[in-house]
Image (tube, rainbow, N blue to C red):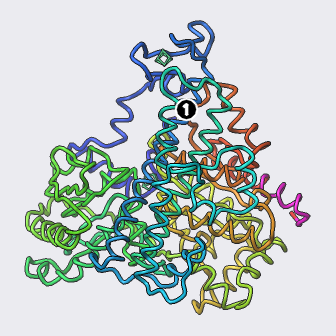
């Protein structure tokens, strides 16, 4: 039987409309691609030089070596290293832009108020003397430290890692020789190491992959989150709604899609300011909603509702009610312009490295942010007047959500229970078994699996078994849409122990209702927040993070970024579940290294399981085994 395309009712309602409107979606194109190439799926083809493409026959009926002599192990490991380096590159580039913005803000060229607490916290971590320095001076010191990582020509390790990673882990990575230097240099080296006639040793290549995970974790994720928090504020709890039902028929609907919050926050600001112009154009106001991680960013800091996640980005336009969709970088389907051409929707690209034929390009630079944002909002207002009312169908589905759980917000709530040792109530409840463990669910949707199903079924099973779930990225969207990010979700889905803890925490936070069973910690770069939480718990207990009853999962991963984030989680010593098989099965050796061998040297490993309930069982077993080793009741 063919599996359904999605479990999201809004998606199921819009799919028939898409066909009626003659819109081709990601699911149609996926079907057109069937059968997908078996060689590619197994990771056994190589195009790294022009003698190729070479492909290895996995059944040993054909060639067992590439033309240059590369073995299947070499080819699979090289391919993986390139993918993980690709993911790390995306995040480091993202972080770099944030650093540039902070530099301009520190020099008063840009007007940002700068988060005092975060400035102090990061400065202290980096060993910057804070005495007598004002906000801008501190910001400039932090910028200098960030650029020092990026400009380092020697063998100095990434300072962002040395300052923020768990100490026991640093020793493990040092012994393996995988502590990265300048992130740009490491990414360049990965490209070099994998080009024709270079590294043929799969073990060396897998270790280089782990190194890219660290590049991503500290010079990508952590750096981006830290700097964005300084610029835009550290999130605190917000309450809003999720799913396409947040779009409003009589409002100008403007969707923010992509990853970088610098422009998104400007748009949020100007949409508020320009409400009157929308009213003058006949609308009741302007409704902003977010897709993918730009959506998560403005949700976390400004309480903007979530429209939908990765796989349904085209269907948002199919509602016929989106007046403009503005995109920046990453996870933007090139098909959007084509879909929008069936409606009145304006697709607006903004970045020099993301242009789409058929879209309008309004360049966003750090200096012209306010001007670009106004232009974009006005474009949406003008488009509102061109709507075709016959084409409008907004599915009436949305769920209440609570989000904004930065580590600071979580610690803030815990402080109301124990002001001296805020982590104590959390750790005590892990120790006594009310909370069995913690799982971070992260990453994307992938058209190969029913949208959101893996996220939701896995997480329901985990919270039923008293696992506290923290989520980011499109996983967070999926769980929000499924009602797992509100107090009712705790009543309905959490096991008794977890429910008791979340109820007590909710009361302490003055909510008169439990905290949600899944805490939304932000965008994909905000996986650093999960890393910070794990690091803080490990430090509090004075144990290696690899020993904690904590695991990670990317249930429906699609992007190279998800692979690099997952690799980082493995370097932290976490068992990291993948719900979609990555292209490595062509090499038994590489597969075994990733799922078994690595755990001997690094503590963490990948765990691939495509059935959500079996995956939950596997993660629960892993958590119980870790509890047992720590002498905790399981
Ligand atoms: Ni993460 Fe976020 Fe979504 Fe996947 Fe894409 S938006 S950065 S990559 S698809 S979670
Ligand atoms: Fe073939 Fe080797 Fe060239 Fe890859 S690098 S395409 S395996 S000859």
Q: Residue at x 44, y 24 (%)?
A: 35
Q: Position of residue 366 (x, y in %)?
A: 26, 67
Q: Is residue 342 magenta?
A: no
The structure residue drawn at horizontal position 48% and vertical position 21%, both measured from the top left corner, is 196
Q: Circle 1: is it few (<14), some (14-19), or many (20+) Cα within 10 Å?
A: some
Q: Residue at x 30, y 64 (%)?
A: 256
Whole-percent x, y for residue 225 in the image: 48, 67
Vertical arrangement, residue 336 with respect to residue 218, above or below: above
Magenta-drawn segment: 622-633
Is 44 on the left or on the right of 174, as rendered?
left
Query: Which quarter of the figure has residue 24?
Result: top left
From this viewpoint, is residue 555 visible?
Answer: no
Image location of residue 566, percent across then percent down: 59, 49
Front-lying residue, 250 or 366:
366
Q: Furthest residue to the right?
A: 631
In this view, 132 is above or below 623 = below
Seen in the image, is 228 located left or right of residue 62? left
């Amino acid at each position: 039987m063919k599996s359904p395309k999605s479990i999201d009712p809004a998606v199921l309602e819009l799919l028939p409309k898409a066909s009626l409107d003659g819109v081709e979606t990601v699911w149609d194109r996926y079907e057109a691609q069937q059968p997908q190439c078996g060689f590619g799926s197994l990771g056994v083809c190589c195009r790294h030089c022009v003698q190729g493409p070479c492909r290895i026959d996995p059944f040993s009926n054909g060639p067992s070596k590439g033309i240059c002599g590369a073995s299947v192990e070499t080819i699979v490991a090289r391919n993986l290293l390139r993918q993980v380096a690709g993911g790390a590159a995306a995040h480091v580039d993202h972080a770099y832009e944030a650093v540039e913005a902070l530099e301009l803000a520190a020099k008063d060229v840009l007007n940002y108020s700068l988060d005092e607490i975060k400035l102090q916290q990061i400065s202290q971590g980096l060993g910057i003397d804070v005495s007598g320095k004002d906000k801008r001076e501190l910001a400039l010191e932090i910028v200098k430290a960030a650029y020092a990582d990026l400009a380092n020509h020697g063998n100095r390790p990434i300072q962002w890692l040395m300052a923020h990673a768990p100490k026991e882990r640093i020793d493990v990575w040092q012994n393996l020789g995988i502590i990265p230097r300048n992130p740009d240099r490491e990414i360049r080296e990965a490209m070099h190491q994998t080009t024709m006639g270079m590294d043929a040793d799969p073990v060396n290549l897998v270790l280089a992959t782990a190194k890219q995970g660290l590049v991503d974790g500290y010079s990508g994720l952590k750096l981006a989150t830290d700097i964005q928090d300084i610029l835009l504020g550290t999130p605190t709890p917000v309450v809003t709604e999720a799913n396409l039902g947040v779009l409003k028929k009589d409002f100008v609907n403007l969707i923010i899609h992509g990853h970088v919050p610098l422009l998104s926050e400007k748009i949020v600001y100007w949409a508020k300011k320009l409400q009157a112009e929308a009213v003058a154009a006949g609308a009741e106001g302007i409704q902003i909603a977010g897709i993918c991680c730009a959506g998560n960013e403005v949700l976390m800091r400004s309480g903007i509702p979530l429209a939908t996640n990765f796989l349904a980005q085209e269907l948002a336009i199919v509602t016929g009610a989106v007046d403009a969709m503005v995109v920046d970088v990453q996870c933007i389907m090139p098909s959007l312009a084509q879909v929008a051409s069936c409606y009145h929707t304006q697709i607006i690209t903004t970045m020099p490295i993301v242009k789409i034929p058929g879209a309008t390009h309004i360049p966003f630079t750090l200096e012209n942010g306010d001007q670009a944002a106004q232009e974009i909002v006005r474009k949406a207002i003008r488009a509102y007047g061109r709507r075709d009312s016959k084409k409008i169908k907004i599915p009436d589905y949305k769920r209440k959500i609570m989000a904004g759980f930065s580590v600071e917000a979580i610690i803030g709530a815990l402080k109301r229970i124990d002001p001296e040792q805020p982590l104590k109530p959390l750790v005590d409840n892990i120790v006594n078994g009310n909370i069995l463990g913690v799982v971070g669910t992260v990453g994307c949707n992938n058209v190969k699996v029913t949208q959101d199903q893996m996220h939701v079924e896995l997480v329901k099973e985990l919270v039923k078994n008293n696992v506290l779930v923290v989520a980011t990225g499109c996983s967070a969207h999926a769980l929000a849409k499924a009602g797992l990010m509100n107090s009712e979700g705790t009543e309905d889905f959490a096991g008794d122990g977890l429910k008791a803890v979340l109820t007590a925490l909710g009361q302490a936070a003055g909510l008169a209702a439990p905290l949600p069973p899944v805490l939304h910690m932000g965008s994909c770069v905000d996986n650093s927040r999960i890393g910070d939480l794990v690091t803080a718990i490990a430090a509090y207990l004075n144990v290696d993070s690899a020993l904690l009853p904590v695991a990670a999962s990317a249930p429906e991963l699609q992007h190279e970024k998800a692979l690099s984030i997952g690799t980082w989680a493995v370097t932290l010593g976490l068992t990291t579940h993948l719900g979609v098989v990555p292209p490595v099965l062509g090499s038994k050796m590489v597969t075994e290294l990733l799922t078994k061998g690595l755990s001997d040297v690094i503590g963490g490993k990948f765990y691939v399981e495509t059935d959500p309930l079996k995956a939950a069982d596997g993660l629960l077993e892993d958590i119980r085994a870790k509890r047992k080793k720590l002498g905790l009741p399981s």
